[in-house]
Image (spheres, rainbow, N blue to C red):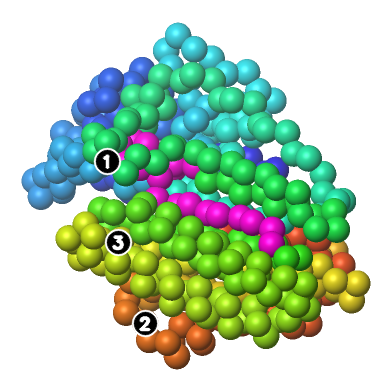
């Protein structure tokens, strides 16, 4: 893994000064301040005095005063700060420090984004187990800027993390995991991503939902959508029994109905709570997979962003369902956007031409999918 080197001198001076004032406000140690900004407390004060224009100085001060100011506002990521020692702590690592800047320990780079992390995937027999990286040291800087807060709203409680593992068919295994992201924890918000997995009538079934951050009940919408989807699919397959095992077209129709049913359940839940359905806004991704002697039968459905992919030794990573992006950054489609039957049906696909040696299928919300794509392209 390539180490990241932080060069504070590459930031514009106004941003460096604003960051220095922010860190001083948070009470970080002098060594931490120098590592992150290249300034000592005295140097930062002197440079601020020498800012040429009053308007520039006001911008620096305003950025520092902002309650929303975080390292992300300065183009910084948490991995660059995880290894920064406080005044009475030190971090020993072969990657720890070089002449041209601080390098965090490699184990710290597992914290890669300020987004909700959620994913579900099937793992074949040949998959290797992965040991969790060691926990990072309890560093003063991290705890001063990034806190673990409990939500004040106690209604519709959601656990901060969830993981499930189920035995599948023909040696496959279904594994699902979701956890509250760093920013949600810092702001005292609930986890808004969720998933459901099941095995029914020879099919592996996966549903993943990402509640909209701007919707106050999105965690309820996400949970409602995945539960309604899996309940309907399991009931449909159970009724068909053995006939369902080879009927891909029936699964395609079942996924279409599942999308419509999930959307209807969101409408009903909003009505029950006397709120607008947009407050339950969520994406929804579905994967139905069946291993066969000839390869794989796969049907997918996707409303919104995130990714559904397959991996095989011969073909590497193959994108399956199509993510939906809006006109502007961060925009996407939601199941609550009153999509008609034909629009929902168009989002269901029978995936053909999959390599026989496919060993892994992943269903990911954007928090995982974006990091997955960036890591593959780097």
Count residues near mark 2 (Cα–Cα under 10 Å), then give few for <14, some for 14-19, many for 20+. Answer: some
Question: Which residue is at the far bottom?
Answer: 342
Asked if disc 2 and disc 3 are in contact, CB closer than 8 Å, the reply is no
Q: Is residue 280 visible?
A: yes
Question: Percent position (x, y) of residue 188?
Answer: 30, 36
* Distance of label 3 from label 1 (alpha carbons): 15 Å
**Magenta segment includes 128:** no
Query: Mark 2 — residue?
Result: 339
First in sequence, mark 3 or 1: give its number.
1
Residue interval drawn in magenta:
179-200
Can you identify the residue that label 3 sits on? 269
Give me the disc on residue 33.
Answer: none
Question: Where residue 208 appears, x then y in whole percent?
Answer: 52, 59
Above or below, 184 against 169 in this view is above
Residue 275 picture location, percent across and down = 19, 61
Q: Secondary structure at mark 1?
A: loop
Label located before the other in sequence (2 or 3): 3
Give SS at disc 2: loop
**Pointer 3 local density, CA inside 10 Å: few below 14, some 14–19, many at least 20:** some
Q: Residue at x 32, y 31 (%)?
A: 150
Q: How dense is the environment of label 1, judged by Cα within 10 Å: few (below 14), some, or many (20 and up)?
A: few
Which residue does the image show at 59% across and 41% down from the upper left? 163
**Residue in the foreground of this view, choosing between 299 and 231:** 231
Front in this rendered view, residue 110 or 310:
310
The vertical placement of 354 against 370, above or below, is below
Which tag is nearer the camera, tag 2 or tag 1? 1
Q: Residue at x 91, y 72 (%)?
A: 293
Provide the residue designation for mark 1.
155
> Is 45 in front, or is 345?
345
Residue 362, by quadrant, is: bottom right
SS for tag 3?
helix
């Amino acid at each position: 893994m390539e180490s990241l080197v932080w060069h504070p001198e590459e930031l514009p001076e106004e941003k460096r000064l604003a960051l220095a004032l922010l860190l001083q406000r948070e009470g970080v140690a002098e060594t931490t301040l120098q590592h992150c900004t290249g300034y000592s407390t005295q140097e930062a004060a002197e440079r601020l005095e020498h800012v040429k224009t009053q308007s520039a100085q006001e911008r620096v001060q305003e950025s520092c005063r902002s309650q929303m100011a975080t390292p992300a506002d300065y183009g910084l990521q948490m991995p660059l700060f995880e290894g920064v020692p406080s005044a009475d702590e030190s971090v020993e690592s072969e990657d720890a420090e070089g002449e041209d800047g601080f390098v965090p320990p490699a184990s710290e780079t597992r914290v890669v984004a300020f987004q909700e992390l959620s994913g579900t995937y099937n793992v074949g027999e040949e998959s290797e187990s992965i040991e969790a990286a060691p926990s990072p040291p309890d560093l003063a800087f991290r705890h001063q800027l990034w806190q673990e807060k409990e939500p004040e709203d106690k209604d519709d409680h959601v656990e901060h993390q969830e993981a499930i593992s189920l035995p599948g068919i023909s040696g496959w295994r279904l594994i699902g995991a979701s956890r509250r992201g760093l920013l949600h924890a810092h702001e005292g918000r609930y986890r808004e991503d969720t998933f459901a997995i099941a095995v029914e009538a020879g099919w592996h079934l996966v549903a993943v939902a990402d509640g909209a951050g701007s919707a106050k009940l999105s965690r309820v919408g996400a949970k409602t959508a995945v539960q309604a989807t899996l309940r309907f699919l399991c009931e449909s397959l159970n009724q068909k029994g053995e006939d369902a095992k080879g009927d891909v077209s029936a699964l395609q129709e079942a996924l279409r109905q599942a999308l419509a049913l999930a959307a209807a359940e969101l409408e009903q839940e909003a009505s029950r709570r006397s709120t607008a359905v947009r407050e339950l806004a969520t994406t929804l991704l579905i994967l139905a997979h069946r291993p066969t002697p000839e390869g794989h039968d796969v049907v997918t459905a996707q409303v919104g962003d995130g990714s559904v992919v397959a991996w095989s030794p011969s073909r590497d990573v193959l994108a399956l369902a199509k993510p939906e992006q809006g006109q502007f950054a961060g925009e996407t489609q939601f199941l609550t956007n009153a999509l008609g039957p034909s629009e929902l049906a168009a989002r269901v696909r029978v995936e053909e031409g999959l390599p026989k040696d496919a060993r892994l299928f992943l269903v990911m919300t954007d928090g995982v999918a974006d990091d997955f794509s960036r890591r593959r392209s780097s």
